Each structure stands twice: as C-alpha cells, then as structure tokens.
Amino acid sequence: MVSESTETAAVRIENLRFAYGEKQVLHDVTMDIPARQVTAFIGPSGCGKSTLIRCINRINDRIPSARVTQGSILVHGIDIHRPDIHLQELRRRVGMVFQKYNPFAKSIYENVVYGLRIAGVKKKSDLDAAAENALRSAALWDEVKDRLHTSAFGLSGGQQQRLCIARVIATEPDIVLMDEPCAALDPLATLKIEELITSLKEKFTIVIVTHNMSQATRCSDRTAFMYLGNLVEYGPTMQIFEKPREKQTEAYITGSFG
Ligand SMILES: Nc1ncnc2c1ncn2[C@@H]1O[C@H](COP(=O)(O)OP(=O)(O)OP(=O)(O)O)[C@@H](O)[C@H]1O
Ligand SMILES: [Mg+2]
C-alpha cells in the first residue's frame, strides 16, 4: 500500500464479480465499508459471505481457480489489484481472524510477537511492550500475564481466539476481518469476543461474518444481507433488522427463509 487517501470508506467494493473456475459466486457487489465501525455480513450458507470477506485481503488468491472477473476493491482509496500491491503488506493492513482459532504451536508471547519478528523487530523491550499492548487490547492480558511463555494450546478456546486477535492487532492493521469468529465458542466466550469487537472499533475497522442474528444486532453498526452471491440489502443494522426493505431480508431475519 502506498499512501492514505482522503476516502471516508475504509473499503470500497465496486461491481465485484468473483468466480471459482466457471462458477460465478459473487454478482456485481457494490458497497462501502466505513472506517472504525463494525460491518456484519449475514445470509444463508453458501451465499458468498466468506468469499467476499476473503476478497478484501486477497486471501482468496491462494485458491488456484479463484478469480475476480470484474470490478474493484479499494482499501483506503488504493486498488488492491494494482500490480505493485505487496500482498504481505496488504494482509498486514487487512488482518484476518478465522472461525477455527489457529494459534501457532508456540508460547503465548511468541504468538503475539510473531508478525513483529517477521517484520524485523528485534529489541526485546519493543517486543515486550507490543505484546502487552496487543494482549491488553484483546482483553487477554490479565488472564495470561503470568504464563506468557507457556504454550498457547494451554488456553481455553475463547482465550485462544482472543490470542489470535491479539496476534493480528499486534502488527497494527487498519482493518480486521473476522469470519465467524465465535462459531466454535460457547456463549460466555462468545460474549467476551463481542465485547472485544465493540472496543476494537475505536482503533480498527471491523468486518465480521456471522450466522448469529443477535450477534449482528449486538455488535455491528451496519449489516449486509447476501443471498446467492448478491448483496440484497445493506444499511444500518437497526434498519436492516427492524425495517428491512427487501422481502428476502425480512424472511431471513425472521427465520422464515426458503
Ligand atoms: N474453494 C472453492 N472452490 C469452489 N467453490 C467454492 C469454493 N469455496 C466456496 N465455493 C462456493 O462458493 C459459494 C460461496 O461460498 P462461501 O464459502 O463464500 O459461502 P458462505 O456464505 O461463507 O457460506 P457459509 O455460511 O456456509 O460459510 C458456494 O456456492 C460455495 O460452494
Ligand atoms: Mg463462510
């Protein structure tokens, strides 16, 4: 990424078409994702939520058949498909948290400082400060400060997911993508992540995929409803849930779908 522009949208998706091989799975998706808010993607299984969120940091590029066939994605005004885009830098600026928490087989500390070490940070005091900062931001510090050098696998599932969030935010991204981050967690651990998401939006732009309607209403500012690869409706979360404009949206959120 080269420079920041004055765009107000953190992410601008324009007429995006996307295919796996011959199969088109996103149809002319256009949306602006505002900075420092939480935007939720909802919709039935297979509608393209993961595909869309994974376009934003081009992690779909890892799938050989995957391709954008039309349209563009701008991150802070910069076209992420420009030939001079450095993918590693894009993915640092647009970090990602997955459904199945995936800490490395390393200590809690080494998980958090992993990206910084890769970026060449060597000074212990810098790494220590960054680790503490990220763990505090991820609401995990108090639970792990006395066991930083023990295995990440010794943490509970919810703690491991918060560790993965700490690992992402340690490298100071602008945007954090979360694809069903609570799907593998119990209700209490889910609530903690939701509180965390709400606090993170002070610093970061968050995009979250969720199947959980109450989660979307609890922690998102804007909601996008997708169906069969189309963005059916997108607006303030309250409006989407209380006064949906489209019949399909209403059917989905009231559970009378299909
Ligand atoms: N690697 C792939 N190769 C081919 N088709 C794929 C691939 N990944 C997803 N698809 C297809 O693309 C469409 C959208 O899938 P996607 O995973 O984005 O949906 P989703 O909304 O995230 O679903 P879920 O809620 O089940 O996670 C589906 O028809 C799916 O079968
Ligand atoms: Mg998915």
Image (tube, rainbow, N blue to C red):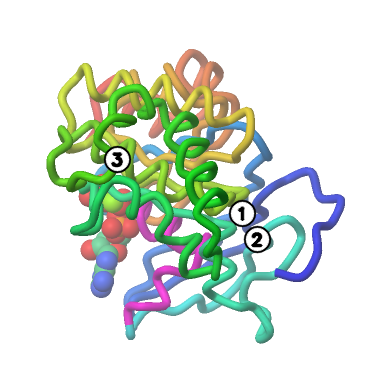
**Residue 93: image location, x then y, percent:** 59, 58
Amino acid bearing label 2: Glu
Say above or below: 115 vs 140: below
Q: Secondary structure at mark 3?
A: loop
Q: Residue at x 80, y 64 (%)?
A: 3
Callout 2 crowding tier (Cα within 10 Å): few <14, some 14–19, many ≥20: some
Q: Which residues are magenta?
A: 48-63
Q: Residue at x 63, y 35 (%)?
A: 203
Write down the residue under mark 3: 148
Task: Tell me if 13 is positioned left or right of 27 in this view.
Answer: right
Amino acid bearing label 1: Thr
Write down the residue under mark 1: 30
Q: Secondary structure at mark 1?
A: strand
Q: Nearer the viewer, residue 91 or 73?
A: 91
- Which label's residue is closer to the chain start, 3 or 1? 1
Say above or below: 32 vs 94: above
- Which label's residue is closer to the chain start, 2 or 1? 2
Amino acid bearing label 3: Leu
Write down the residue under mark 2: 14
Badge 3 vs badge 1, beta-carbon distance below 8 Å: no
Task: Tell me if 243 is positioned left or right of 163 in this view.
Answer: right
